[in-house]
Image (tube, helix red, strand yellow):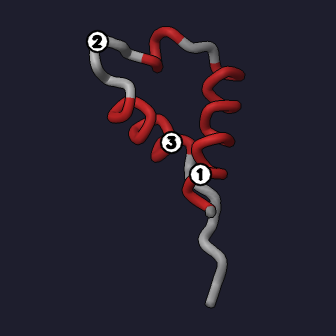
Amino acid sequence: MKQRPPLKMDKCIEFTNKKFSEGLNLAKMLRNYEYQFLCEETSKIFSN
């Protein structure tokens, strides 16, 4: 079975915004490097 490719950034942002959308817009609050870290952490969760 082929390994799934890592999540694309836009998918990560979409997922993150859904998860934390209760009164927060993380896209506006977080800097890019923080988003990148969050995306990497999210990707780890999905790849398990």
Discs 2, 3 touching: Cβ within 8 Å: no
Q: How many marks?
A: 3
State the SS at label 2.
loop
Foreground tag (2 vs 3): 2
Q: Residue at x 50, y 42 (%)?
A: 12
Other residues around mark 3 within 10 Å, as few (<14) / some (14–19) / many (≥20): many
Q: Residue at x 62, y 90 (%)?
A: 1
What is the quadrant of residue 39 in the picture?
A: top right
Q: Earlier in the sequence, mark 2 or mark 1?
A: 2
List the single residue furthest toward the left. Answer: 22
Q: Earlier in the sequence, mark 3 or mark 1?
A: 3
Other residues around mark 2 within 10 Å, as few (<14) / some (14–19) / many (≥20): few
Numbered mark located on residue 45 in the image: 1
Residue bearing mark 3:
12
State the SS at label 1.
helix
What is the quadrant of residue 33 in the picture?
A: top right
Q: Residue at x 50, y 9 (%)?
A: 29
Q: Is residue 45 above or below residue 31?
A: below
Q: Quadrant of the C terminus?
A: bottom right
Q: Earlier in the sequence, mark 2 or mark 3?
A: 3
At label 2, which amino acid type do we have? Gly
At label 3, which amino acid type do we have? Cys
Residue 13 position within the rendered picture, expressed as x and y whole percent measured from the top left:
47, 35
Residue bearing mark 2:
23
Residue 17 position within the rendered picture, expressed as x and y whole percent measured from the top left:
38, 30
Other residues around mark 1 within 10 Å, as few (<14) / some (14–19) / many (≥20): few
Q: Residue at x 67, y 21 (%)?
A: 34
State the SS at label 3.
helix
Nearest the eye: 28 or 1: 1
Left or right of residue 38: residue 20: left
